[in-house]
């Protein structure tokens, strides 16, 4: 293999060639691209390649180490699964956008400097928005525009921060940055936008559910996990991230419980899972960072599996609203099974992938004596995610009341992709050693201890009991067609309304001022004209004494001014 070939470029360039192919040749090409990129990545020895000198600064376009390798590897595995999942799709735009997007994400993970990172960072934004626009509705166009503006803003902050870092340190190398300098804060904010920090998160719930059936699956894998990688690279051990991550794990639970759109429920649970990773980065110990990398790896698989199952439902039924579904296990048994596996994985059931990764982060927090409150919040969040993703998603989609909808099972290629993702979720959960061997630091951790297993099972069983009691007593919020207000209301509705009110106020004030000035000018003009007419004071004969008084006053003023000089 070529030592300087970035595996992401295989997907990126290969994706641009997709329109030249048709039929089985296109299918073979789409499957071959991630397979070739995987081979290139695995063949690359750890090190830095592709060094370029630019204006006295050194760019490192390709860097392979333990941290970048594990993220690039799962990105390429995800790209292969999603290529399989989308084989039935005839829309060339989605195939091109998906491959370019995945390639840009892989290349960004392997970037060794901030300028190279910025280029691929922005390319992920530009490529991914077409997966939203490909739905070709007025709503998807508007959502895509908002998504693109926010993602491009993140890139501009990254570029500005990179420039300030280069000025301060004389280097663009992408390594630990920290928050000691203004440039570090700008880059931190750029990463935070893409990672969907609280109050910066609404683009995720706004955009992902509006993408196409396959587009949402692709979107779920790359953008936010690229931000997790960037935070782990640049801000490991930053204490602010513990607080931010803890909040991220908790607040989405309340929205997910009352949300009717099941793809939007998954988007909120994505926020919840990102919170675990952000907490791990904030703690910054070897165990915590290993847990973050492992959880990102597992999360991409089980979250993709859940979005795949809901995508299959949307394709066959035409809706993913919980109020309109139910009883689909009769028509889509395989999709039901795969969804349950994804639900068990995200809920961290023993023998499923989420258990062997999430427990690492909780254990890392428990080892810090002053972070007991974080452990409590993470346990609460674990119960919450089981509640809305582990139970709500499969229950309302495939069981609950029988909606009477009967449809065909998902296409074969979708089932193959879901089956492969489900096999990986179970395989990692049963035998996590191969995953642990890929992590950045040596792993000295055993997930299957009696304490871990019993604690997790108790948590899950009590959460299931709470769901059952609330359903039986009617306390659980029913699935209704509704719109849930989130903090994006302030800039999508409140801010434009406030701006309109301010503009209207100043327009009214300006109108009043103009009318007042016009009226005043007309009165002055009338008085001047009246004084100049016959009999007016300007043309009247003045007495000699009056003229003498004015002349004396004028001379006095001139003399006084002369003295003051």
Image (cartoon, grey):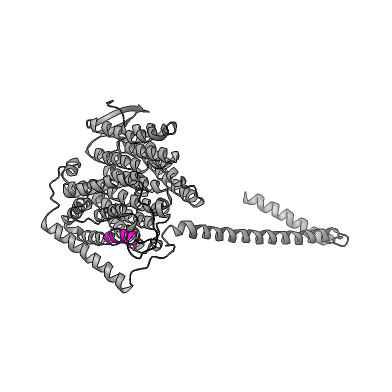
Residue 17 lies, in percent from the top left, at 41, 31
Where 441 falls versus 330 (above or below)? above
Which residue is depicted at the point 43% across and 62% down?
485
Residue 23 lies, in percent from the top left, at 41, 35
Q: Residue furthest right?
A: 534
Which residue is depicted at the point 76% across and 62% down?
523
451 left or right of 407 in image? left
Q: In the rendered structure, which segment of residues is drawn in magenta?
A: 386-404
Which residue is depicted at the point 41% across and 55% down?
317
- Decide if residue 371 is in sight here: yes
Q: Residue furthest bottom?
A: 473
Which residue is depicted at the point 43% across and 57% down?
488
325 or 344: nearer the viewer = 325
Quarter of the image with the N terminus is top left
459 or 324: nearer the viewer = 324
Secondary structure mostly taken by the magenta-highlighted segment of the chain: helix
Residue 439 lies, in percent from the top left, at 20, 42
Snapshot quadrant of residue 526: bottom right
Residue 313 lies, in percent from the top left, at 37, 53
Q: Residue furthest top?
A: 2
- Decide if residue 239 is in sight here: no
328 drawn magenta: no
21 or 461: nearer the viewer = 21
311 or 250: nearer the viewer = 311
């Amino acid at each position: 293999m070529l030592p300087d070939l970035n595996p992401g470029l295989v997907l990126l360039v290969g994706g641009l060639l997709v329109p030249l192919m048709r039929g089985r040749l296109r299918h073979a090409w789409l499957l071959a691209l991630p397979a070739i990129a995987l081979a290139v990545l695995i063949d690359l020895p750890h090190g830095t390649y592709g060094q370029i000198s630019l204006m006295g600064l050194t760019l490192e376009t390709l860097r392979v180490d333990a941290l970048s390798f594990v993220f690039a590897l799962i990105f390429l595995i995800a790209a292969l699964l999603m290529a399989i999942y989308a084989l039935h799709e005839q829309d060339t735009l989605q195939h091109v956008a998906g491959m370019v997007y995945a390639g840009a994400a892989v290349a960004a993970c392997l970037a060794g400097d901030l300028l190279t990172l910025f280029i691929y960072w922005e390319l992920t934004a530009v490529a991914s928005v077409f997966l939203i626009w490909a739905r070709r509705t007025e709503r998807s166009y508007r959502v895509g525009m908002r998504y693109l503006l926010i993602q491009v803003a993140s890139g501009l902050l990254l570029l500005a921060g990179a420039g300030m870092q280069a000025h301060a340190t004389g280097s663009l190398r992408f390594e630990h940055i920290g928050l000691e300098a203004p440039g570090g804060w700008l880059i931190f904010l750029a990463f935070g936008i893409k990672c969907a920090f609280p109050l910066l998160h609404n683009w995720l719930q706004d955009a992902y559910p509006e993408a196409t059936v396959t587009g949402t699956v692709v979107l779920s894998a790359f953008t936010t996990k690229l931000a997790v990688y960037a935070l782990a690279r640049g801000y490991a051990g930053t204490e602010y991230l513990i607080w931010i991550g803890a909040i991220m794990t908790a607040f989405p639970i309340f929205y997910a419980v009352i949300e009717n759109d099941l793809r939007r429920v998954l988007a909120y649970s994505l926020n919840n899972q990102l919170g675990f990773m952000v907490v791990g980065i904030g703690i910054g110990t070897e165990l915590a960072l290993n847990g973050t990398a492992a959880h990102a790896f597992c999360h991409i698989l089980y979250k993709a599996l859940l979005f795949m199952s809901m995508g299959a439902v949307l394709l066959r039924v035409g809706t993913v609203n919980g109020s309109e579904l139910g009883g689909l296990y009769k028509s889509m048994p395989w999709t039901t099974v795969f969804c349950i596996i994804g639900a068990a994985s995200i809920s961290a059931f023993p023998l499923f992938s989420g258990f062997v990764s999430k427990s690492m982060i909780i254990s890392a927090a428990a080892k810090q004596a002053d972070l007991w409150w974080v452990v409590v919040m993470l346990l609460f969040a674990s119960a919450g995610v089981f509640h809305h993703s582990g139970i709500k998603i499969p229950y309302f989609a495939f069981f609950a009341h029988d909606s009477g909808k009967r449809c065909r099972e998902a296409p074969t290629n979708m089932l193959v992709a879901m089956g492969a993702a489900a096999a990986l979720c179970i395989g990692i959960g049963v035998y996590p050693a191969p995953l642990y061997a890929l992590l950045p630091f040596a792993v000295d951790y055993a997930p299957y201890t009696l304490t871990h297993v019993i604690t997790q099972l108790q948590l899950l069983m009590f959460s299931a009991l709470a769901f059952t009691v609330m359903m039986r007593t009617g306390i659980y919020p029913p699935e209704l067609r509704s719109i849930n207000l989130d903090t994006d209301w302030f800039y999508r509705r409140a801010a434009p309304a406030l701006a309109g009110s301010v503009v209207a106020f100043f327009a009214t004030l300006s109108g009043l001022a103009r009318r007042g000035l016009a009226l005043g000018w007309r009165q002055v003009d009338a008085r001047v004209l009246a004084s100049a007419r016959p009999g007016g004071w300007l043309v009247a004969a003045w007495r000699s004494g009056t003229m003498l008084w004015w002349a004396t006053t004028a001379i006095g003023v001139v003399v006084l001014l002369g003295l003051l000089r």
